[in-house]
Each structure stands twice: as structure tokens, then as C-alpha cells.
Image (tube, rainbow, N blue to C red):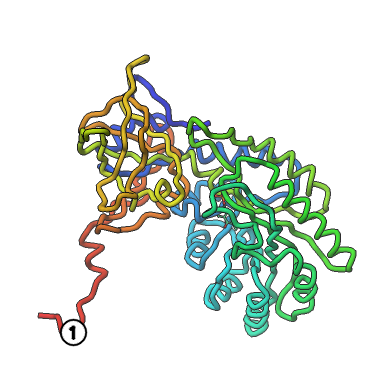
Amino acid sequence: MDHFTYKSGRLHAEDVALDAIAEAVGTPVYVYSSATLMRHFTVFNIALGDLDALVCFAVKANSNQAVIRTLAGLGAGADVVSGGELQRALKAGVPASKIVFSGVGKTEGEIRAALSAGIKQINVESVPELERISAIAEHMGVTAPVALRVNPDVDAGTHEKITTGRKENKFGIEWTDAHAVYRKAASLPGVKAQGLAVHIGSQLLDLKPFRDAYVRAGDLVAMLRADGLDVEVLDIGGGLGIPYGAEDETDAPTPQDYARVIRETVGNLGVQLVLEPGRMIAGNSGVLLTTVEYVKEGSTKTFAIVDAGMNDLIRPTLYSAYHHIVPVAEPAAGAPLTELDVVGPICETGDTFAKNRRMAPVRAGDLLVLRTAGAYGAVQASTYNTRALVPEVMVMGDAFAVVRPRQSVDDIIALDRLPHWLED
Ligand SMILES: *Cc1c(COP(=O)(O)O)cnc(C)c1O
């Protein structure tokens, strides 16, 4: 459920008409609904009920300060995957004690920053990383709390670019090596081995891979304990899929269904669970608002050329992702549909948001919304074609605020420097 609905014939974010935002801020613009963000976090948390669980929002899905702070206010922790995200989470007010740090390539500087901040846990992805963390921590005179990210070798059955839990993926320590590596971790002077982590992929619409991975993780916990090793934390990752609205889409599991799998597989292990949902919290909380610049009638197709491009929202071209596209002006009930390709202005054939999409006819100047753009949208934007990063707006009831202003082209050009031999 989200808070983007038609009222009096215009699409609103909560109580704010999207036309009003387009008028005030221009397009393209990302619009986030605080009520939706808070609702998703709360529903997820409530589904976990009495489990000893810490929900750490995966900041890479949407790292705007306003988004992180909104969630931090509800008690969310943060899952970060870079030193930059660590800084963002701390700055937004997430306590270090609720931050976990994942990622396959943590640099020395990033590890130092995490240890200085005193975060809850570093999820370790390889033996060399484990050794590096131990050495840095010893040098700093601290003990690094670590979990081993194990690769449970299950196929998440999702898009190949977002599946992470098969042994041919780069993530985690191979399942069969995990026991030996955990024992090694327990013996290293600079680290405290406190648990395990699994994260098998993103946009999972089937609970079976979660179940398989969690059963494996539970078995491993039992094996480690039988060997006299301490396991206090089990980080079960993120990845729960959400509806994007495609006609052929499988229904997304509810947080309640997901929580049942968690209870049945790892609910009685006597560990603290850490969860790292990103998309599930932020995805349906945001839209990308765009204006139709031209309608171009080809001999076989009609193109709606919009002012947003693949640099603003790369998911369709990167993951063949579907985004539902709706007009801000509510189409009359029963109005005839037409077939459109919705494309951006960028000089790449991949700059296509939808092909042969059946939707209400559009005219130049119309406002359209690409729905479910709150996760992996603004965070993946680039300035390709020297297109400035678009603004982000957050809505709360009948109020809205610009939470990232539109970049200017001057800002972009000012990042360049001429070598001395080209200066006037
Ligand atoms: C990306 C990522 C997540 C979040 O995935 P979602 O599909 O957005 O829930 C969680 N944990 C790790 C380690 C990740 O890399």
C-alpha cells in the first residue's frame, strides 16, 4: 500500500498534488512520501513481532538524509556498503550501535572509519578481509565485532544482475569453508566473531530461496556451537521483493509471509536477528515525475519522449525492470488505451522506460509518473550527457520540501580542471 492516489482527478502524493510539485520544482523530480516510508518500515517491524530483531535499512536503496532520518526516527538501523554510506547514516542520526557494514571490497580507510565510529558489526566477505580487519583493529587497540557473510549457494531466482547467493557470485565466504573460517576468526586477536550473515539477492518474489538459505544458516549456527564457538547474531539480509505492477508479475510475498519463514527457520536459534531490507521499505515510497516533451508518431510506433532519462533512472535499461507509468491527470474511466514507447532524450537506444506499453494517450506537456522509483532510483543517477542530477522532494501530509536541490550544469562543469598548458 502506498500514498500515491488520485484525488479530484489529479495524482497526489499524500495531500500534495503532483502538479504543484512540478510547478514549484520543475521536472524531472523524485517525490517521496513519508507516510509510505514510515508505513512500510512499521509493517515490516510489526510482522517480526516478538522476534529479537534489528531492522537495518539498506541505505544503498535510497541514501537521502531525509529518508534515512525519517526511518532512524522509527528506530531503524542502517546497512551500509561504503565509507560514504557510513558517513551518511551517522550524519542522519543512526546510532553506530545499529549500523552494519557489508560489501566485498572494504578499503583500509573504510574499515578504520567503521572501527572509529564503533559500529555494531562488520560483515566479512573473505579471509584476506578478515585478516586485514584484525590487523587494523589490533593496531587501533580495539576489537572489531564481525560476522562472516556466508554464501549459501542457493539460487534466488531473480534477475542475474541482482542475485548474490550462488557460489559463482563474488559475495561471501563459500558455504563449505565457513566453519574453518569462523574458527580462524575466533582465534584472531583483533576481531570478535559474533555471528553469520547471508544475503542472497534482491527483488525475490519467491520465499523458497529465503527458506533454503535460512535453514542452511541455522544448520551452520548449530555446527559452530557444537564446536564450542559463540554465535550471537544472525544477519539474514534483505531482498524481499515488491510489486512493480507488471501484468505478468508474480505476487510479492507479504512481510507476514516472510516473517513466518523467518520464525520457522531461525526463530528459535537464540540469536539476535539483523534484517537489511532496502527496496521493501523505499521502493513504493517514491515516484519519478516527468514531463512529456514530444509525441513522435513513427510508421510502426508512437514514442512519448519525456524529460527524464536513463541517467535519472537506470533500472529499466540495467535490469530490464518494469515501472508502472501513469498520468498525473486521471484518465476518464473506460477511456480507450493506446500503445506507447516511453523514452528519454539520451543518445542511447537503452534510454527506454517502456516498450509497447498500453496506456492512456498522452500529449506534449502532460505530466507522467514512473511509479516504484523510491529504491535504486536517485541513488543510481549519473550526469551522463551533462544532465544535472534531478531534485528530490519529500512529502508529509499537505507539506513538501526539497530534500536535494537540482544540481546546476555550472556545478558539473566546475568539477573539471584545465591542465596548465591549456589555460589562457
Ligand atoms: C543490496 C543489499 C541489501 C538490500 O537489498 P534489497 O533488495 O533492497 O532489500 C541488503 N543487504 C545487502 C548486503 C545488500 O547488498
Quarter residue 357 falls in: top left
Q: Looking at numbered disc 1 in the image, what kind of residue is underneath it?
A: His
Residue in view at x 33 percent, y 53 percent: 311
Q: Nearer the viewer, residue 335 or 421?
A: 335
Expressed as whole percent of the image width and height from the top left, the position of residue 252 reads: 59, 36
Residue 140 shows in this picture = yes
Residue nearest the observer in this picture, 348 or 188:
348
Q: Is mark 1 within 8 Å of ligand 1?
A: no
Q: Quadrant of residue 400?
A: top left
Using the image, determine if residue 14 lies above or below residue 334: below
Could you tell me residue 242's position as x and y percent?
55, 39
Residue sitting at 33 percent across and 39 percent down? Answer: 289
| 88 sits left or right of 206 in the view | left
Q: Position of residue 412 (x, y in %)?
A: 25, 63
Q: Is residue 55 left or right of residue 334?
A: right
Label 1: state its secondary structure: helix
Which one is in front, 109 or 240?
240
Give the residue pinned by disc 1.
420
**Residue furthest left in the image:** 424
User: In this orientation, does residue 295 appear?
Assistant: no
Q: Quadrant of the image for the C terminus?
A: bottom left
Q: Nearer the viewer, residue 36 or 330?
A: 330
